[in-house]
């Protein structure tokens, strides 16, 4: 999809130089940058949701499972 966006000249120039250095188009550079930003944003929301859950729930390991895990690790499994 084609779209038009406005960005500061300095950012455009730096992005243009980086695209040339990497041997990719500006469109590919902007797509990669936007994908990375969106992924970071998704991850942030997942972390926030997990923090909300574990602020209300006990997240400690069951003692029996902890003992079994320790025994398995000591055997080198």
Image: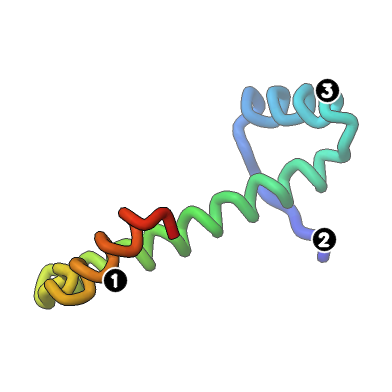
Mark 2 to mark 3 CA distance (whole Å): 24 Å
Identify the residue under disc 1.
Answer: 49
- Locate residue 49 relative to residue 37 in the image: left or right: left
Q: Quadrant of the C terminus?
A: bottom left
Q: Tags 2 and 1 in contact by the CB under 8 Å rule?
A: no
Residue 26: percent from the left, percent from the top?
81, 39
| Camera-nearest label, 2 or 3 | 3
Alpha carbon distance from label 3 to label 1: 39 Å
Count the marks.
3
Taking the image as shown, residue 55 lies to the left or right of residue 28, namely left
Q: What residue is shown with label 2?
A: 2
- Judging from the image, what secondary structure is the residue with disc 1 in? helix
Q: Is residue 46 above or below residue 38?
A: below
Marks 2 and 1 sit apart, C-alpha to C-alpha, by 34 Å
Q: Residue beneath label 3, please?
A: 21
Which numbered mark, 2 or 1, is in the foreground of this view? 1
Q: Quadrant of the N terminus?
A: bottom right
Give the residue drawn at x 87%, y 37%: 24
Q: Position of residue 11 (x, y in %)?
A: 63, 29
Relative to 2, say whether 7 is above or below: above
Rendering coords of residue 37 (x, y %): 55, 51
Answer with the quarter of the image where residue 69 lies. bottom left
Q: Give the mark, 2 or 3, whose residue is nearer the N terminus.
A: 2
Task: Answer few, some or many: residues within 10 Å of disc 2's Cα (few below 14, many 20 plus, some between 14 and 19).
Answer: few
């Amino acid at each position: 999809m084609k779209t038009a966006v406005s960005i500061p000249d300095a950012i455009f120039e730096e992005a243009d130089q980086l695209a040339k250095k990497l041997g990719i188009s500006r469109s590919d550079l902007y797509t990669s940058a936007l994908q990375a930003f969106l992924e970071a944003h998704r991850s942030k929301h997942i972390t926030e949701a997990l923090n909300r859950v574990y602020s209300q729930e006990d997240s400690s390991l069951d003692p029996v499972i902890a003992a079994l895990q320790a025994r398995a690790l000591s055997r080198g499994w």
